[in-house]
Amino acid sequence: DAGITQSPRHKVTETGTPVTLRCHQTENHRYMYWYRQDPGHGLRLIHYSYGVKDTDKGEVSDGYSVSRSKTEDFLLTLESATSSQTSVYFCATKTGLAGGTGETQYFGPGTRLLVL
Amino acid sequence: KNEVEQSPQNLTAQEGEFITINCSYSVGISALHWLQQHPGGGIVSLFMLSSGKKKHGRLIATINIQEKHSSLHITASHPRDSAVYICAVSSSNYQLIWGAGTKLIIKP
């Protein structure tokens, strides 16, 4: 499995505070993703990155921003956390190389965020 | 209507039973993925396929491109197979379209 870590693993915060989640990979994968997972919804894409400083929005990007200043790290920031952002957040990566397992996504362990 | 539909949503079976989980999609795809999410939350890719069939241990995944349908089979099911099984399709180079998952419980 790809070496993907997320930090923090658990966080409790208050409404209105900024929160930053970090995804770190050691596999030199080009693509990185942030998802949220909520009961009844499955995984929903928040933002993704297709290279250093190259990012784009997913289907549920409102209230979130991302940054990728180097290959290894993809940061997700909740500018002003709301209770609706209470969720489990997963980071994923893939190589994107043609053929073989280039399209397989490898997931981090997840971050449980509770916004009170 | 969701672009990726899984059935059933929930499945409970006895140990040893043959399990089938279905996935139908409505978009053009380059590949279909099956993933497993354990009760502890970790997500693991099981298969990626664009045609035919793949087998890994007791797991078999098939896809019919013409019918836009895939199945995941588990033979000789075991309680440790209890998990959520997720189908997702690659329709672009960047993103996956996700099914809602099938929660499988195997009772001893």
Image: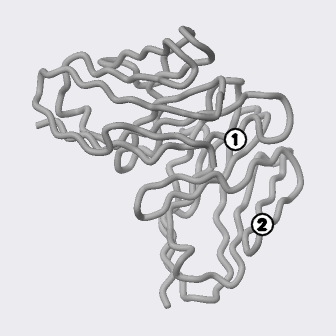
Instruction: State the residue position of label 1.
Output: A104
- Seen in the picture, residue B62 relative to A50 is either above or below; the reply is below
Identity of the residue drawn at 16% across and 40% down: A12
The quadrant where residue B17 appears: bottom right
Quote the CA–CA distance across marks 2 and 1: 16 Å
Q: Residue at x 73, y 44 (%)?
A: B32
Q: Nearer the viewer, residue A26 or A115?
A: A26
How many residues crowd mark 2 within 10 Å: few (<14), some (14–19), many (20+)? Answer: few
- Residue A29 x/y as whole percent: 65, 29
> What is the chain identity of the residue bearing mark 2?
B
Instruction: In the rendered view, tell whether residue A13 sits above or below residue A53.
Output: below
Secondary structure beneath label 1: loop
Q: Position of residue A104 (x, y in %)?
A: 69, 41
* Neighbourhood count class around disc 1 (C-alpha, 10 Å): few under 14, some 14–19, many 20 upward: many
| Dot label at residue B86 | none
**Residue drawn where x is 49% and y is 91% of the image:** B108
Going by the numbered disc 1, the residue's amino acid type is Thr
Amino acid type for the residue under numbered disc 2:
His
Which chain contains the residue that carries disc 1?
A: A
Give the residue at mark 2. B56
